[in-house]
Image (cartoon, rainbow, N blue to C red):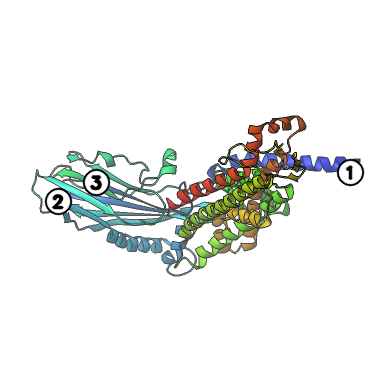
Amino acid sequence: MRAVLSRRWQIRLFAALAVVSLAFAPTLAQHALAHPLGNFTTNRYARIEVYQDRLQLHYVVDMAEIPAFQAMPEIDSDGDGAASEPELAAYARRRAGELPRNFELTAAGKRLSHALLQSTAQLLPGQGGLQVLRLVAVYDVPITGVESGSNVPIAFTDTNFGETQGWKEVVVRGSAGATLSGAEAFAADQSNALLDYPAESLRSAPNVSEASFSWVAGTGSPAPLAANVQLAEAGRVSGGFAAVFEDLSDGNVSFGFLLLSLLIAFAFGAQHALGPGHGKSMVAAYLVGSRGTPKHAVALGLTVTATHTSTVYLLGVVTLLASAWLTPEKVYLWMGVAAGLMVVAFGLGLFVQRLLQYRREGRTQGMHRHGLLGKAHSHPATHHPDGHDHAHSSGHAHDHDSRVTWRSLLSLGVLGGLLPCPSAVVVMVAAISQGQVLLGMLLIVAFSLGLAGVLMAIGVGLVLGRRTPGRARRLFERPLAARAVAVMPVLSAVVVTVVGLGLTYQAAGRV
């Protein structure tokens, strides 16, 4: 009896710890991304300032942790592992000279020449011990060959970083006395030159690559002799899962602190799984229409863990070794598209299989239906929502639920863990770059187990929830409820397909 009680209290203690971890995870994850737009993004900003006889173009590039990490070999020219001020200055001049190849300023249809006034590059603290990179360049653009007082159309086109994910903004600002028309749409500086991203716009970052307006030639104040470069005063707050690695990376930690860090990483993984995605809808739809058991739910979670961990390692290797051919951002985005398409294929296959089974069962009972939800004609049937066998007047027994197959279960687990968390990739890259590979791998496994634990809990809850009490079963003896239960496996396959279509559409829009 004591042993039973002891086990019960152990289970309760474990459950309490899990609840506390999940409760604190959202608080701990409030700064989960050191860069507000994500760890893979490259963001650009162009501000055109209009003066009496010229333009000044202020151009800013803000690279998140992964692109900044990949730019380090180009910055660190002597290969000592650190970027000195002269190296940063040389990099800024070199990149500032390359950027104009992909943008163009014209006045009255004539391309304007430009001269570099000032350039600077800053490396600032980012997530997981990595850094973010900010590059600022200011160009002087004289306007010649226009008649004073004439209406001059000015156009700007920018194709830099067109294939990358991130914030792309163009601002037009007139000096005192400058007469502009059509520039109102570009007057708002939403990000303050990429120093302060507005929270409400992060889900729909601007993607502006062109601007056009008219200027009355000769209006405006003289251009300043020195350019005003906006520097960042501090790096970004590092927090979330990657901060756990930062606390451990110096190596001077106790065994107890390491265990606590692994528990926190587990909690971050669980909190991450509670966010959008990760196949929770797909898992729910599949298990609702299947005769799953707690054993199946656990196997599903373990498969998700293995897949999620493997994809994090894969992107880490791509970032370090194959970035010349495959950018991790593109790999990540195409993995999202591939995952969505595979979910669609999985759902369609499941739909065909369950529809054929549904029709086959009707023929076996000597029944026919008009339409998928049509009433069965032959003899009354009693259907129960837990998928158990039941008898008809003909004396045979069968069930209407589709059994779980290990092939479909493993496929579902792979799809649920295929798309890795960017923060986990940052931890992997930081761990490899700092020679803490084993530590990074342990943290990622703990993180993935937290993610999989949520999916297992959802699966077990759905499986156990299908065991309806005896009184409630009477509801399913009614013909309409019986038909709904019979068709549930087919409808759940439709839901899986719809989820896959949504994932594919969302991922394809970012490629």
Q: Is residue 131 left or right of residue 362?
A: left
Choose mark 1 or mark 3, whichever is in front: 1
Q: Secondary structure at mark 1?
A: helix
**Up/down of 3 relative to 122, above or below:** above
Please name the residue that numbered disc 1 is placed on: 3
Amino acid beneath label 1: Ala
Cα separation, mark 2 vs mark 3, equals 17 Å
Mark 2 / mark 3, whichever is N-terminal: 3
Asked if marks 2 and 3 touch (Cβ < 8 Å), the reply is: no
Residue ID at (19%, 46%): 51
- The quadrant of the picture occupied by the C terminus is bottom left
Residue 377 lies in quadrant: top right
Mark 1 / mark 2, whichever is N-terminal: 1
Considering depth in this image, is 414 or 258 the residue closer to the camera? 414
Q: Secondary structure at mark 2?
A: loop
Q: Secondary structure at mark 3?
A: strand
Considering depth in this image, is 123 or 185 the residue closer to the camera? 185
Q: Residue furthest bottom?
A: 78
Residue 427 lies in quadrant: bottom right
Mark 2, Cα crowd under 10 Å, few <14 / some 14-19 / many 20+, is: some
Q: Position of residue 201 (x, y in %)?
A: 41, 41
- The numbered disc on residue 108 is 2
Please name the residue that numbered disc 3 is placed on: 49
Amino acid beneath label 2: Ala
Asked if marks 1 and 3 touch (Cβ < 8 Å), the reply is: no
Q: Is residue 232 visible?
A: yes
Q: Position of residue 265 (x, y in %)?
A: 64, 49
